Image: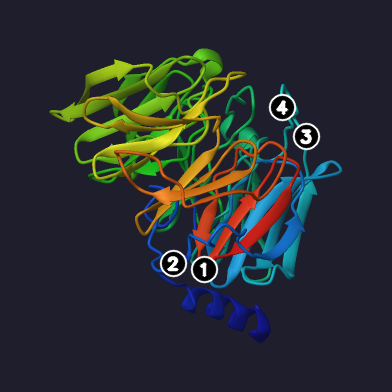
Amino acid sequence: MTAQILLLTLLTVSTLRAEDWPNWRGPDHNGISREKGWKSDWGGDDPPVAWKAEAGIGFSSFTVAGGLVYTAGFNKEKDTLWCWDAATGSQKWQHDFPSELGDKYYEGGTSATPTVSGGQVFFLNRWGEAMCLDAATGKVVWSKNLIKETDAALPDWGFAGSAFVQGDTVFFNMCRHGVALNKKDGSIKWKSAPEPAGYSTPLPGDKGQLLFSSGKSYFAVDAASGQPVWEYPWKTQYGVNAADPVLSGEHIFISSGYKKGATLVKLDGGQPIKVWESKVIHNQFNSCVLVDGHLYGPDGNNGEKGALKCIEMQTGREKWKRPGFDVGGVTVADGKLIALSARGELLIAPVSAEKFDPSTEVQVITGRCWTTPVLANGFIYCRNAEGEVVCLKVK
């Protein structure tokens, strides 16, 4: 490693801020930003655009760390990992590698979001290519074809879960209930049976456990050994268990689209017991965010119009809904909902179980927008399926 690369890496690690968003669903894996004091109302005017960029086709969201922002997209028979200056949009590096569009019933392109940890970027594309890059320079540390190394079955729409890094291990939602790699060189620590995975991202739970989805169930797995602790059957049409579960103490909320609905389970003696199940909400792709006992998120089925909803977690009772939101995404920061509809309308409103009363309703982008917006260090990042990226200044 040259002195220049070493300096860049150390700067990236040392300049991480509390308001960074280094991985899918944020630093606490729950869709809630730690950021305070950002501007959410412009008196009827549009929020100022800091910069725009093109990322290529896909639905990858954004990670922000050390003054840099990362995402991924597909263009001309290759996937690209992008790194830009988070405030100005100036390109720092890009990493291209051969890939396929995979436009089965939709635009195709990239699904997972890059994960930044310890000065490195981890990524898994839809076809099982896993990689680790230097976060400051984009230099490849290691790259693995995990389908070849694990015999994993490829889900119908490819792998979509982002990497989860813990200690010296990186986890991916592949096979029946996950795969664990050595973070240093990508060697396999453990793998599960080669059955189709779900599309969610590994989620940390209690007692050293991680939650994974397969095409038929949700699992709690001992992270060290890879042994399943419990399994909760959850069969969704086409095996699309895509939304991450939402945790609250001993309770776990699970939701899927395709008319499946949602359930709340409680761990009783370490095993999940159903509290309620209904069709009050369907998280087809993006998860709900939990605030003060209420879940805020998209209710949408494939090919149908959906709404932004608030439901009470313990009862499943609907509190309010905003029609026309479809399968967009929601983030929460400083007591406010940041919601991007599937048609690119940005809605900002106080978090309230009583009503939805947005202070901002602005069309920030057009086209299909299934990607969750991200707030970090005074900027909101949004994108559409075609890869148009817009960064809004909200300092």
Q: Which mark is residue 59?
A: none
**Counting other residues with Cα less than 10 Å from the Cα at mark 4, is it few (<14), some (14-19), or many (20 or more)?**
few
Badge 4 element: loop
- Three-letter amino acid code at the position of disc 4: Tyr
Camera-nearest residue between 339 and 215: 339
Q: How far apart, in angstroms, are the residues tagged by discs 1 and 3? A: 33 Å
Type of amino acid at the residue the image marks with label 1: Gly
Question: Which numbered disc flags the more N-terminal residue, 2 or 1?
Answer: 2
- Say which residue label 2 marks: 19
Identity of the residue furthest to the right in this view = 76
Residue 298 pos. (x, y %):
47, 32
Is 225 situated left or right of 392 in this image? Answer: left
350 or 198: which is nearer to us? 350
Q: Amino acid at mark 3?
A: Leu
Q: Are marks 1 and 3 in contact (CB under 8 Å)?
A: no
Is the Cβ of the residue at disc 2 closer than 8 Å to that at disc 1? Answer: yes
Residue 170 appears in the figure: no
Answer with left or right where residue 33 lies relative to residue 222: right
| Figure check: 253 above or below 86 | above
Label 3 SS: loop
Residue at the (53%, 54%) spot, across then down = 374
Disc 2 is placed on an element classified as loop
Secondary structure under badge 1?
loop
- If you read the primary sequence from the N terminus, does the residue marked by circle 3 or circle 2 appear first? 2
- Residue topped by disc 1: 378
Residue depicted at 61% across the width and 36% down the height: 342
- Disc nearer the start of the sequence (1/4): 4
Question: Mark 2 belongs to which amino acid?
Answer: Glu
Q: Are circles 3 and 2 on residues that touch, CB within 8 Å?
A: no
Viewer-nearest residue: 140 or 337: 337
Q: Residue 384: x percent and y percent?
A: 69, 43
Q: Which residue is mark 4?
A: 106
